[in-house]
């Protein structure tokens, strides 16, 4: 008899719930107090739901919030009132959430007015006819757009642009696979470039800010863009090695676009003003979240975006990020992170602890959401006695570089879903990219981050 996977998850979930209600076991086995035991129960429930995706990820965030307010808070603070509950509610409307909201609005405008495809088409036309140049051109365009837009949307758009190129390539030439893989791999890496590129970046910045270690928008870019470019070159060389083009010549036809209207220039102006505001927060003193409100007000106030566009924003991602930050609050308030850190041997060197965290992050991200991975690991890393900047930033970066399977990232899934790729096409280059990324990120942590005084 064959069972539906959801029913298996349902049974396992109820078993987990039953065990977590017996949280006294954790107190005895791990020598935890009641609050820490409950926090561990909530962590296990969140991890189970994030890994299995039995319910939508944003629902998991709601479950975390509910359990922490009605179960954890009364135990660690019996006299808690509404004011104390705000500690768990505030992550859902923090500066980081507003930053992502502003980024989503800008991305929505770029896509609605076709500016993303204009830029992509124009840049690709400049690459010439040689396959290596076309490949690096596709990767750079995909990465740059993914710095500011959803990498999922960028992947879908870029696939539509390059499919005519793929159709020109003979079936016997495997360079077409390199072109198809270049897009999701570059979109994954493009998320490294800015704080709004991917949720793990924002999660890292939020936890560091809570520790009084504020990283500006510009500082993040100075740290991440050299790494992103280095990895893009590595992926480019790897794809050419595995899928050589031979003597292939390719032509690219630029897609026709209409004339630039006033609305197009308004969108460009708003984009540039917002990015400038993000880059100069230290000069004008306005927080990065407050700056992010500007494109929301202007875009919808002037009618550049409609109410329907507002409803279509990826609100689930905002709740996913908020839920992860909320979970971290519970782990901190209960003291569970302190207990977890004490399990790490005190005599082990910083380097080996870092490598262990990065390998764990890469393994987890290969099979589950990178947002979920960051939500589970960064709250622990941020409580280490080592230089937490040297841990948190690399963990967030590794979450964007593990891409060995079709399920590893949404761009990978889109590429695989095109029907033009097989799993084996993705596994080999994806594995080497993940491995080399860990090594390079370790080197960045040891030799590059200290240059910024981290």
Image: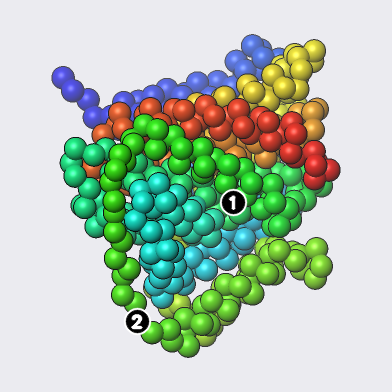
Of the pair 236 and 38, the residue shown nearer to us: 236
Residue sticking out furthest to the front: 247
Can I make out residue 346 in this image? yes
Sequence-first tag of 1 and 2 = 1
Locate residue 85 relative to residue 268 in the image: left or right. right
Instruction: Tell me the tag on residue 258.
Output: 2
On the image, the x and y values in percent for residue 65 come to: 57, 45
Q: Which label is found at residue 193? A: 1
Q: Is residue 68 above or below residue 138?
A: above
- At x 52% / y 68%, what residue is drawn? 106
User: Furthest residue to the left?
Assistant: 1
Name the image quarter holding residue 74: top right
On the picture, is 187 further left or further right than 382? left
Say which residue appears at 42% left-offset and 22% top-offset: 15
Give coordinates of residue 186: x percent, y percent.
Answer: 46, 47
Between marks 1 and 2, how big is the CA–CA gap?
A: 30 Å
Q: In the rendered image, which quarter is residue 382 located in?
A: top right
């Amino acid at each position: 008899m064959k069972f539906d996977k959801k029913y298996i998850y349902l049974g396992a979930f109820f078993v987990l719930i039953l065990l977590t209600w017996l949280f006294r076991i954790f107190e005895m086995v791990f020598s935890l107090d009641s609050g820490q035991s409950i926090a561990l129960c909530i962590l296990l429930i969140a991890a189970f739901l994030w890994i299995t995706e039995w319910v939508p990820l944003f629902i998991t965030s709601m479950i975390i919030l509910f359990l922490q307010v009605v179960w954890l808070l009364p135990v660690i603070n019996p006299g808690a009132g509404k004011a104390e509950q705000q500690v768990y509610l505030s992550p859902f409307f923090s500066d980081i959430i507003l930053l992502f909201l502003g980024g989503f609005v800008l991305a929505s405008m770029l896509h609605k007015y076709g500016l993303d495809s204009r830029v992509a088409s124009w840049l690709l036309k400049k690459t010439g006819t040689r396959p290596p140049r076309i490949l690096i051109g596709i990767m750079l365009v995909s990465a740059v757009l993914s710095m500011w837009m959803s990498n999922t949307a960028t992947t879908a758009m870029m696939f539509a642009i390059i499919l005519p190129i793929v159709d020109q390539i003979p079936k016997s030439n495997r360079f077409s696979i390199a072109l198809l893989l270049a897009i999701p791999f570059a979109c994954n890496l493009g998320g490294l470039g800015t704080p709004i590129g991917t949720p793990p970046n924002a999660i890292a910045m939020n936890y560091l800010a809570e520790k009084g270690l504020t990283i500006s928008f510009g500082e993040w870019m100075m740290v991440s863009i050299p790494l992103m470019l280095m990895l893009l070159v590595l992926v480019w060389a790897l794809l050419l090695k595995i899928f050589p083009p031979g003597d292939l010549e390719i032509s690219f036809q630029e897609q026709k676009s209409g004339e630039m209207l006033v609305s197009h220039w308004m969108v460009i102006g708003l984009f540039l003003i917002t990015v400038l505001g993000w880059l100069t927060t230290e000069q004008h003193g306005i927080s990065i979240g407050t700056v992010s409100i500007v494109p929301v007000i202007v875009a919808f106030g002037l009618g550049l975006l409609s109410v329907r566009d507002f409803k279509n924003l990826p609100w689930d991602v905002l709740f996913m990020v908020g839920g992860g930050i909320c979970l971290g609050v519970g782990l901190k308030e209960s003291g569970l992170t302190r207990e977890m850190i004490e399990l790490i041997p005190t005599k082990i060197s910083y380097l080996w602890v870092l490598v262990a965290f990065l390998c764990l992050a890469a393994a987890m991200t290969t099979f589950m959401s990178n947002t979920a991975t960051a939500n589970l690991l960064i709250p622990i890393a941020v409580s280490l006695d080592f230089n937490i900047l040297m841990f948190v930033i690399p963990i967030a970066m590794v979450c964007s570089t593990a891409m060995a399977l079709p399920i590893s990232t949404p761009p990978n899934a889109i590429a695989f879903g095109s029907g033009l790729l097989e799993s084996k096409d993705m596994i080999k280059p994806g594995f080497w990219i993940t491995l080399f990324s860990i090594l390079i990120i370790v080197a960045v942590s040891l030799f590059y981050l200290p240059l910024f005084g981290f």
